[in-house]
Image (spheres, rainbow, N blue to C red):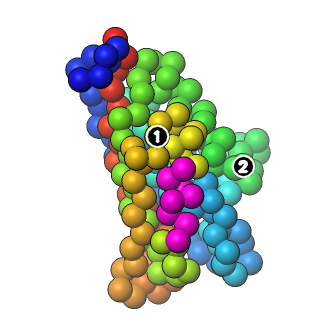
Amino acid sequence: MLLGFKRDYRLGQGYDVHAIAEGLPMWLGGVKVESPKGFVAHSDGDVAIHALCDALLGALALGDIGHLFPDTDPQYKGIDSKILLDKVMRLVWRDGWRVCNADITIALQAPKIAPLVPQMRETLAKIMEVGPERVSVKATTTERLGFVGRGEGCEVWAVVMLQKRS
Ligand code: MG
């Protein structure tokens, strides 16, 4: 046990999907992916950050990002999802929690994003104010099966563990 933290933990999981279309930017894990296609969304469409935010909110039973940042609200049009993650982290910190670790799995057929994983881990860890060793990002395809395999969308699962400060 780390000094200054209680043995009070919360586990959260998040899930998100965005459709893929031509000519849109592709942001994943806070990093710009070079691709002729991108994600259809009200925000910048960073489906990995959205799943992570939902995991953080889920751990504290604070609802979900659709509830917190409604896509009917023009202030969130095209917003950088890193700002949304920062807003969610403020709720986590406000209530005296910190991130123990996060584990994110991104299912995307193309392009290959494995080379960007270290940068995603650094980017997300910095916003959550933890070391990158506490943030895992895994990239997989679905072997051309399903909507992900046909290149129609991207699917992301995230799990986080939070620990209460004493
Ligand atoms: Mg989303």
Q: In the figure, 78 relative to 62: above or below? A: below
Q: Mark 2 or mark 1: which is in front? A: 1
Measure the alpha-carbon separation of dots 2 and 1: 25 Å
Looking at the rendered image, the quarter that the C terminus falls into is top left
Q: Looking at the rendered structure, which numbered label has been put on residue 79?
A: 2
Residue denoted by label 1: 131
Image point 44% across, 78% down: which residue? 148
Q: Nearer the viewer, residue 69 or 13?
A: 13
Quadrant of the image occupied by residue 99: top left
Secondary element under disc 1, as helix, strand or loop, is: loop
114 displayed left or right of 163: right
Query: Is residue 136 within the magenta segment?
Result: no
Q: In the figure, 106 relative to 122: above or below? A: below
Q: Nearer the viewer, residue 65 or 123?
A: 123
120 displayed left or right of 162: right
Residue kind at label 2, given as amino acid type:
Ile
Query: Is residue 118 within the magenta segment?
Result: yes
User: In the rendered structure, which segment of residues is drawn in magenta?
Assistant: 115-122
Secondary structure character of the magenta stretch overall: helix
Q: Is residue 45 visible?
A: no
Looking at the rendered image, the quarter that the N terminus falls into is top left
| Image spot of residue 38 (x, y percent) | 65, 72
| Image spot of residue 72 (x, y percent) | 68, 47
Q: Are marks 2 and 1 in contact (CB under 8 Å)?
A: no
